[in-house]
Image: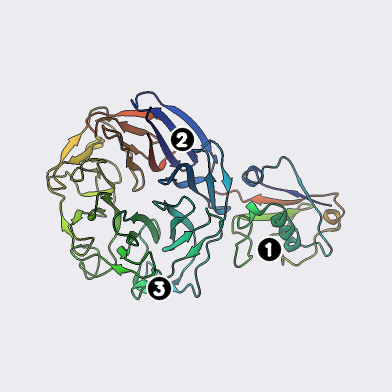
């Protein structure tokens, strides 16, 4: 019997939502770590019972929690994130150089094959890795020490490395995204990196087509076709067919191409989802109507998905980490809002129901499909 | 025996109820108390002070005997009442926000 486990990180704790394969009735477990900001909770593809969670607080700093039983119980593991060598500087909001300072872990990406290996994307932007189940973390300094590093400037939310995609076809290939430096690719397991931002255009930059400096909000790919990347940028929805070597816009008929999450259908690599948000100054859906947009053509042609979603007086946001899909035969799509709702669709987005209505603001949603 | 009061979040993290009691060799200072605390409860490393700089986190404060000791040197001797165990060394999460 198949089942689904939805891991939800919120501003005030983590929640584990479970259902059978019908995805109609849900059990809500939590809050785990009440009162803490849970930036990301993600399970290992190699061991579904192994889950890692990023727990942080403005008072008490960063912690990492690990579960070995599917989120029923947790243990704190290593939380020492120290930059390798001289931390150096990045560009501050006023254009001056600013010392690198570790603030928090935004994203945890477990290895596709080893439950003890996890990559961590942190603020100020850098990538760390553990190979011992989270006990110790070591930086992969090639990213932070990239020659463009001193030109990286934080987005409004900080200089966060927020997206990590591991390539299941090409061993050693990793894609990451940093706000607001852009997208980078490694072909050697994270030792060296190259910016992959050609084709992006950001009007707020002195050179709108510079090699780095773009505010990339999220990238996604389908595991069967990892060289095809989709991107939700600060403005613009973009696509690359060559592993990021070049990008082109696929915003098409979206009501607005500003937004945060983007994701790909589990079985249809050309079917993608975004949640358009009014603008960079109005972080809520256009016209107060919460709509997921789906393209079955890999972009450009989009349809609004509204059945079961509030179509009036809705002014929530959907953050970059707060959307995921399951891999059941009828692909499930899930997203959480800053209003504390987690919506689920068991039919690829045609219809939606709120699993929960009143959680704290949702920071992340990750789904485990248990066959 | 040094008595230490932890804020709620750190008590829960360390899985302790009430005060923590620590053996701390003289001289008893904030640094020595935190060293002993982290040795007994490794999961608290990095939560009271920074891993690298060993500086107190900005929103964590130290109190004892109705005195704010937060800005004292971490190597200053703690009050005799704390050393004798009559008063606790209090680690407080600063009140912030509206």
Mark toward the start of the polypeptide (3 vs 2): 2
Image check: A149 left or right of A83?
left
SS for dot 1: loop
User: How many other residues sit within 10 Å of disc 3, few (<14), some (14-19) or many (≥20)?
Assistant: some
- Tell me whether marks 3 and 1 sit on the same chain: no
SS for dot 2: strand
Residue A358 in view of the camera:
no
**Pointer 3 residue:** A145
Q: Name the disc covering residue B71, or none.
A: 1
Where residue A171 sits in the image (x, y, percent)?
Answer: 33, 60
The chain containing the residue under callout 2 comes to: A
How far is mark 3 from mark 1, CA to CA? 35 Å
SS for dot 3: loop
Q: Name the disc covering residue A40, or none.
A: none
The chain containing the residue under callout 3 comes to: A
Where residue A223 sits in the image (x, y, percent)?
Answer: 28, 49
Q: Which residue is more in the foreground, A367 or A310?
A: A367
The residue lying at 46 percent from left, 60 percent from top is A129
The residue lying at 25 percent from left, 70 percent from top is A211
**Pointer 2 residue:** A16
Where residue A262 sits in the image (x, y, percent)?
Answer: 27, 47
């Amino acid at each position: 019997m198949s089942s689904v486990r939805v891991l939800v990180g919120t501003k005030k704790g983590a929640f584990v939502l479970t259902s059978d394969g019908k995805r109609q009735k849900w059990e809500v477990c939590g809050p785990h770590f009440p009162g803490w900001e849970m930036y990301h909770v993600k399970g290992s593809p190699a061991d579904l019972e192994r889950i890692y969670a990023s727990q942080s607080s403005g008072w008490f700093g960063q912690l990492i929690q690990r579960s070995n039983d599917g989120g029923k119980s947790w243990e704190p593991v290593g939380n020492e994130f120290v930059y390798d060598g001289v931390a150096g500087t990045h560009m501050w909001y006023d254009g001056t150089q600013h010392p690198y300072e570790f603030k928090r872990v935004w994203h945890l990406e477990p290895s596709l094959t080893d439950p003890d290996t996890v990559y961590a994307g942190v603020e100020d932007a850098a990538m760390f890795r553990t190979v011992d189940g989270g006990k110790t973390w070591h930086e992969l300094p090639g990213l932070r020490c990239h020659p463009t590093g001193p030109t990286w400037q934080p987005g409004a939310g900080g200089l966060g490395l927020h997206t990590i995609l591991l390539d299941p076809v090409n061993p050693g290939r990793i894609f990451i995204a940093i706000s607001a430096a852009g997208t980078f690719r490694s072909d050697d397991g994270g030792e060296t990196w190259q910016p992959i931002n050609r084709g992006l255009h950001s009007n707020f930059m002195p050179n709108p087509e510079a090699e780095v400096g773009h505010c990339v909000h999220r990238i996604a790919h389908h595991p069967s076709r990892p060289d095809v990347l989709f991107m939700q940028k600060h403005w613009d929805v973009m696509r690359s067919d060559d592993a990021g070597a070049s990008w082109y816009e696929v915003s098409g008929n979206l009501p607005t191409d500003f937004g945060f999450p983007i994701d790909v259908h589990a079985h249809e690599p050309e079917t993608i989802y975004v949640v358009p948000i009014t603008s960079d100054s109005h972080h809520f859906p256009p016209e107060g109507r919460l709509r997921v947009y789906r393209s079955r053509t890999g972009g450009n042609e989009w349809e609004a998905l509204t059945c079961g979603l509030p179509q009036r007086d809705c002014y929530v946001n959907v953050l970059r980490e707060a959307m995921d899909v399951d891999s059941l035969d009828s692909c499930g799509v899930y997203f959480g809002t800053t209003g504390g709702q987690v919506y689920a669709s068991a039919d690829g987005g045609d219809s939606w129901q709120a699993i929960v209505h009143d959680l704290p603001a949702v920071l992340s949603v990750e789904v485990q499909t248990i066959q | 025996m040094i008595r230490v009061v932890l804020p709620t979040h750190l008590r829960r993290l360390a899985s302790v109820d009430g005060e923590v009691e620590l053996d701390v060799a003289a001289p008893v200072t904030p640094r020595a108390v935190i060293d002993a605390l982290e040795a007994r409860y490794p999961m608290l490393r990095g939560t009271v002070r920074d891993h690298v700089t060993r500086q107190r986190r900005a929103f964590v404060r130290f109190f004892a005997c109705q005195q704010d000791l937060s800005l004292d040197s971490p190597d200053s001797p703690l009050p005799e009442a704390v050393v004798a165990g009559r008063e606790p060394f209090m680690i407080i999460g600063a009140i912030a926000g509206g």
